[in-house]
Image (spheres, rainbow, N blue to C red):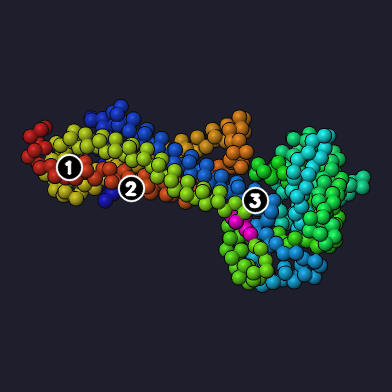
Amino acid sequence: MRSLAWLAWKLLWSKTQKSLQFSGALALFGLILGVACLVVSMAVLSGFETTLRDAVADVTGHIQIVKTLGSEQEKKDLIAEIRRTEDSLVEASAFSYIEGVLAHQGKIKGIALQGVETPQVHRVLGIDQRLLEGKIDFSEKEGDPQVVIGKGIAQNFNLKVGDRFRIVVPVYQGIDPSAFSRKIGYFRVAGILDLGKFEYNERFVISSLSATQALANIGERSMGLLLKFKQIENAPEYSKNLKVALGPGYKIRDWFDMNETLFRAVKIERATIFFVVLVIVLVAAFLVSIQLYIHVVKRYSTISLLKSLGLKKTQVIQIFSYQGLIMGFIGVVGGFFLGLLFCYGFELLQATLGVLPGSVYKLDQIDLNVRFIDVFQIAVATLVVCFGATLAPAIRGSQLSIVEGLKNE
């Protein structure tokens, strides 16, 4: 088999008959370009999925359990039950979530105020790595609780670290469900975050749990728990297990549930785009097949000579099939490196021109992710296509008779 592969290589790159003329080189470039497009498209979709997933998990935890907790003991009992169900739990934090209106210098905007327990916030949420300015500090400064805000809020209200602003929230009054009064809370900006997701940057304010409890007049109560596990990929499975273990009295959502429609759309688009872009590879492989067929015609005398020396039909098929696989391998390797170059160019465009409008795509920047499984699938698909495309010229070469080939010499 090694000798046949060596022979295929020598015949393909023969100096006496240049099999890779301009049209052949063009076909090979088309194959490289097709593979590069596959690499980029899969990297963009994988990057979109992981960037969105990390943005959701960094702000709202791997899993949210919504259940009113009235005391510290209730919280501890619930955490103990969760650990019995899933021992990979890293940390849990009680949280609260309040819709309100941010008012500053004559501007108003609806925002979401999320309160998290101060000691656990750095272990449950991933906001430390998203800090752009200031620091993450929820202590009081000049009598006002400090908070961290999304960069969109900072830009819209021209807020800087140390600035003071107001949040107005409705507070439930009495037994009449329609009776509400407003309450105003004053806060100071401790830090500005890039929360990864457009709507988070435009609406999210994160504070200590005690500050939100005081603003909403809910005493020691919290809305539930934010959970972080060792493996973020397993959060959907953990969520299902917790739903069974805790029963129907709890509303449990993982990072996938919070954007289920979008994540499912990405999975469908991944398969669709893969097969659509694979058409480029199919066309390029067809052109390679034509060039190999011409190569077979040019090699009539060589094939006849090899057959006269005892080469079998199956061995002739193997030689030309190896040539197709060699071309496919060159296409895969060249396409991979060209795809990486395109990925670098895409990230450069994101950084300089901001090609992704966050209001449309939910994310204003994607961290491209070239996954091994994607590269493996692209390589296998390309080699299979190239192998299939070379079968016709390979079979034609094997059917050539010794007399026919020597007669054309």
In which quadrant of the rendered image does the C terminus lie? Answer: top left
- Density class for disc 1 (Cα within 10 Å; few <14, some 14-19, many ≥20) is some
Q: Which residue is mark 1?
A: 396
Q: Nearer the viewer, residue 214 or 44?
A: 214
Q: Could you tell whether 100 is left or right of 364 in the image?
A: right
Residue 256 part of the magenta segment = yes
Q: Could you tell whether 290 is left or right of 164 in the image?
A: left
Residue at the image position 72 percent from the left and 44 percent from the top: 203
- Density class for disc 2 (Cα within 10 Å; few <14, some 14-19, many ≥20) is some
Q: Position of residue 85 (x, y in %)?
A: 64, 71
Task: Return the mark for residue 384.
Answer: 2
Q: Earlier in the sequence, mark 3 or mark 1?
A: 3
Q: Earlier in the sequence, mark 1 or mark 2?
A: 2
Q: Quadrant of residue 24?
A: top left
Q: Which residue is mark 3?
A: 56
Q: Which element carries disc 2, helix, strand or loop?
A: helix
Q: CA distance from mark 3 to mark 1?
A: 57 Å
- Density class for disc 3 (Cα within 10 Å; few <14, some 14-19, many ≥20) is many
